[in-house]
Amino acid sequence: MTTMDAEAICEAVTRPTMRFVAVKSAEQQAALSLHRTRNLLVKQRTQLVNMIRGLLAEFGIDIPEGLERALGLARQIAAKDAEPDVPAMAMQILGLLCGQVLDTHIRLQAIDRSIGALQRTDEVARRLSMIPGIGPVGATALAASVANPGQFRSGREFATWLGLTPSQNSSGGKDRLGRITKMGDLYLRKLLVIGATSLIRRARHKPETADPRLLALLARKPARLASVAMANKMARVVWAIMARGETYQARHASTMAL
């Protein structure tokens, strides 16, 4: 640390409005290491599946869409129950890729079991997982990432921290809202959007079980915009539950007015 750094820190401490990043506990850091590793392995599995698809496509062999179908074929090739009509050299590479993607998938399953166990033992994660659209992965990631929810003055401020609020492009006394800022934690924002997307998919397949406000939102906006709007509202509910120590109840839906 330089003298200028020390001076800057001393100056910051004297300012009453200065806000500091809360220090995460060792347990929270350990939980985040699970999520970082899971995120890396998911990317590697996707790359390996795409590589297998691309290699087979070069020889006119298509794999039906879906991860499970690709993994099913990988298992058959690895067990030598299926031998695509490709040259021996390509078959050797296929065997290598299939073995690696299956090994990666097994490691991912082990991490998912660890995350599920963490969600069951962590009090905050248990409460967060009661929110529609938030599962064990999202609940434990949020619980581990937010050391002190009290540092945010409102749910909107928390959503802003996640980059889920629209940017302001106001001029001449007119308020113009742009796209979301996409600032903050990309991983948490992605998890919330994925959770919102699952709610939208469920609402389309079973509209009788969906929140009427979500159906009204889908009638006004494209699914892509609706998923981001839902993620914004979910973030506000997450903050309310974490900051106030409450559990999710149906009445919280009023805070998610769309």
Image (cartoon, helix red, strand yellow):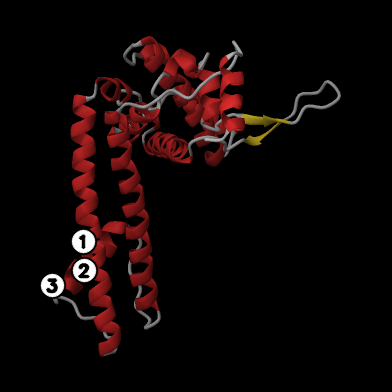
Query: On the image, numbered disc 1 is attached to which residue?
Result: 103
Q: Residues within 10 Å of mark 3 (few under 14, many from 20)?
A: few
Q: Residue at x 33, y 65 (%)?
A: 49
Query: Based on the displayed image, in which of its 4 quarters is residue 57 positioned?
Result: bottom left
Q: Secondary structure at mark 3?
A: loop
Residue hosting label 3: 79
Please tell me whether mark 2 sits on a helix, a strand or a loop: helix
Closest to the observer: 92 or 193? Answer: 92
Task: Report whether 254 appears left or right of 174.
Answer: left
Q: What kind of residue is marked 2?
A: Gly
Judge whether residue 241 can be spotted in this image: yes
Residue 122 % position (x, y): 23, 24
Q: Tell me which residue sits at (38%, 66%) in the image.
A: 50
Q: Quadrant of residue 53?
A: bottom left
Question: What is the distance, in whole Å, between disc 2 and disc 3 at their CAs?
Answer: 9 Å
- Mark 3 or 1, closer to the camera: 1
